[in-house]
Image (cartoon, rainbow, N blue to C red):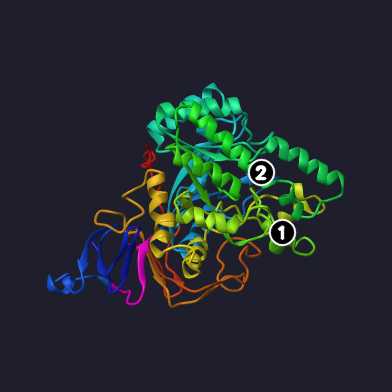
Amino acid sequence: MAKILIKNGTVVSPTGRHEVDVLIEGETISALLQRGQAEAIGVSADKVIDAKGKYVVPGGIDVHTHMELPFGGTSASDTFETGTIAAAWGGVTTIVDMALQRYGENVHEGLAEWHRKAGGNCAVDYAFHQIIGGVDEQSLKDMTYLVDHEGVTSFKLFMAYPGVFYSDDGQILRAMQTASENGATIMMHAENGIAIDVLVQQHIARGETDPKYHSISRPSLLEGEATNRAIVLSKVAGNVPLYIVHMSASEALEAVAEARNDGMNVFAETCPQYLYMTLEDHLAQPGFEGAKYVCSPPIRSKHDTHAHHSDLWKGLRMNELAVISTDHCPFCMKDQKELGLGNFAKIPNGMGGVEHRMELIYQGVVQGHLSLERWVETCCTTPARMFGMYPQKGIIAPGADADILVWDPNGKTTIGINDKHHMNMDHSSWEGFKIDGKVDTVLSRGTVLVENDTYLGRKGHGKFIKRGLCQYLN
């Protein structure tokens, strides 16, 4: 069994920093050793990684991705192969993707299709949530079967996209009641899709068709209203675990903070685009350039009533927001985003980010928004605990999978289509962003995937992870 010793680095956990060496045997971490202890006890390593001056952190876990997702007349441009290679380049060693069931489709067939797409193709480990686009008697039974037998313990519902994924309040309540019985977590896209559709059509009728109107037609008030409504329904269903995905708005955050203060099992994630980007600087770029930044919920205005950026950063510091994911759903401009030329409502919703989350949130550490420990907690450890993968994933400790990112705080990273960019897109959502730090070395289950700016991984290395229930419940 091969042994790897990572020495001289600073191991970072959610609770502190430790000057210890990491011994890996095979696919797992076998020991944390005091400096010099490996030599003293005669450990003979097959490979030694010198992490002097660097941070040794758990591999990143992105619990919200959409590889190969059919949407808006096209499909997300990253395959499971290209998307997980990009993830590896960004220090992400596990993704949780969204298997799809639309109205009228079979849940089991949807999950099987995602296994077919991912199986043998992933560079890093992967798991699935299940989108329930059609809540009925059969899909409710299928939810419990997936929890009990398939290691799929979280289900995503939509209060948006009428006619595609939308569930009404009655359907949501029934799904939540089922989750309260089987222990599953309900993930919610919380926007008032019925009202949004009215606003969208009104803008188009007035000839307001540029990409910026994507944001204007989806006001933050309607995200806040839907979030509050989802929380009320979860309370009626018996304090069922509720996880609000891709939160962008202060009003939504306020609803979650109030629910958590009341002791409810309510959690939320945000994404880098909602921490850094604005309507004015991105969606409102000249011509059709703003289409690159069309995602839902939308990027918010910096002139809004609320200071969304600073509120979300504060929410992360105070644990009102538990997780940072990406909602990685990439589309090329050519032949994909261009479907919405002359009509913002037809622009496929999504951005690419799986490669850059660890980098972008580390920059938040540099800027003083988060502590180093909180970076690890929100990007690695809490995602593992929230979705039933801890302590196999999300921590550097004996017995855990040897999923490790060696991060160089003295390095520099420039993100851009001609700089650092490995996602299958013809543009970078993060063009020109500069990071005061750098991915140095990435290991997945003891296998080196990235080292010396070289990709060493292989298709099919990634394994499917059967997940347990949420480990945060009251």
Which quadrant is the N terminus positioned in? Answer: bottom left
Vertical placement of residue 387 versus 289, above or below: above
Most foreground residue, 352 or 238: 238
Q: Which residues are magenta?
A: 48-59
Query: What is the x, y in percent for residue 239?
Result: 45, 31
Residue at label 1? 283
Q: Nearer the viewer, residue 180 or 112?
A: 180
Secondary structure state at the residue bearing disc 2: helix
Query: Rounded to the nearest whole Å, what is the CA distance between mark 1 and mark 2?
Result: 19 Å
Q: Residue 310 sits in which quadrant?
A: bottom right
- From where the camera sits, is residue 347 visible? no
- What residue did someone put label 2 on? 221
Is residue 108 one of those drawn in magenta? no
Residue found at the far left of this picture: 41
Q: Residues within 10 Å of mark 2 (few under 14, many from 20)?
A: some
Could you tell me the amino acid type at mark 2?
Leu
Residue 312 position in % (x across, y down): 54, 54
